[in-house]
Image: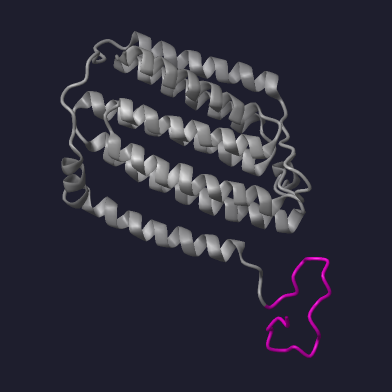
Amino acid sequence: MEQLAFGLVAAVLLYSALRVVSEDNLVHTVLWLGVTLATTAAAYVLLHAPFLAAIQIILYTGGALTLMLFGVMLTQRVESVEVPNAAAGQGRAAIVVALLFGVIAAAVVKTPGLPSSPPVDVPVRALGRSFLTTHLLAFEVLSVLLLTAMVGAIVLARKADPAPAPTPKPAPKAHDAHGEAHP
Amino acid sequence: MTLSAWLVLGAGLFCIGVYGILTRRNAIGLLASVEVMANAVNLLLVAFGRYHGTGDGQVFALFTTALTVTEAAVGLALVILLYRSRKGILVDSAAELRG
């Protein structure tokens, strides 16, 4: 039963990831990424990590995916759902990637003493406790990182305020000295 | 399931992500490939943690999940900036520093 579930999850994961990197339509790429991320949540359930599965759905599938779809819509002149997604050099890349996978898989197979059956489960309670005791410093640093990323993203993506914007729109009038944009 | 099965699955996912990075020319396509790679690493962390028997792997995976999502947010801000200065998001259009 567990073998069957693993096989199913692995097949869906690999297939959807392949579609992410080979799809011609950018919107489809992002949607297949959603399938990959949601299936990873299923893999977390198989690994007895239900809390992480929930976080995966909320943060990735709910947050990051919506964000990426917004990115597609904001940066393309979308006339239809057909948004091109260019690619180049597939042949050489496939050779390099096959070599990389061969090296990693050989290392995994040749490593002696990998455990074949997992020990006891870790309850979510212990996870939360270790967050606020052992890993407290990393937890607090993460909050600083979130703040920094938020400020950084706003600063990067906002329009430059005093200089005239590089859009083909007419520039603001010259007597507008204090730099406020008229509606 | 054995740990090796999860490791090979994670390695496969990671390699697919690398393939995407090498071939994509669209900035959002690149970001999607980075997400696939980060996802593979998260999966490996959780698998190692499960077979190790402590919660540390899951804690590590939670931190990297948060990191990847913030990275996606900042990356998309960069994509919007690229779009504003180049009228397109093909990464080949930003090649001033090319030797």
Q: Is residue A176 magenta?
A: yes
Q: In which image quadrant can residue A126 be found?
A: top left
Residue closer to the observer: B13 or B92:
B13
Tell me, what colour scheme is on the image? one colour
Magenta stretch contains residue B61: no
Task: Give me the residue at 75% from left, 74% from top.
Answer: A164
What x and y, as percent, mark residue A40?
42, 31
Q: Is A5 on the left-hand or right-hand side of A72?
A: left
Q: Write the start and end of the magenta stretch as one range.
A: A162-183
Magenta stretch, main secondary structure class: loop
Q: Quadrant of the C terminus of chain B?
A: top right
Q: Nearer the viewer, residue A73 or B82?
A: A73
Q: Residue at x 59, y 38 (%)?
A: A30
> Looking at the picture, does residue B40 appear above or below residue B27?
above
Viewer-nearest residue: A107 or A10:
A10
How many marks the image carries: the answer is 0
| Image coordinates for residue B64, horizontal then vertical, percent | 38, 42
The answer to whether residue A140 is left or right of residue A180 is left
Query: In the rendered view of the protein, which quadrant contains the N terminus of chain B?
Result: top left
Please indicate, yes or no, whether residue B68 appears anywhere in the rendered image. Answer: no
Residue A165 showing in the rendered view: yes
Image vertical order of residue A131 relative to residue B54, above or below: below
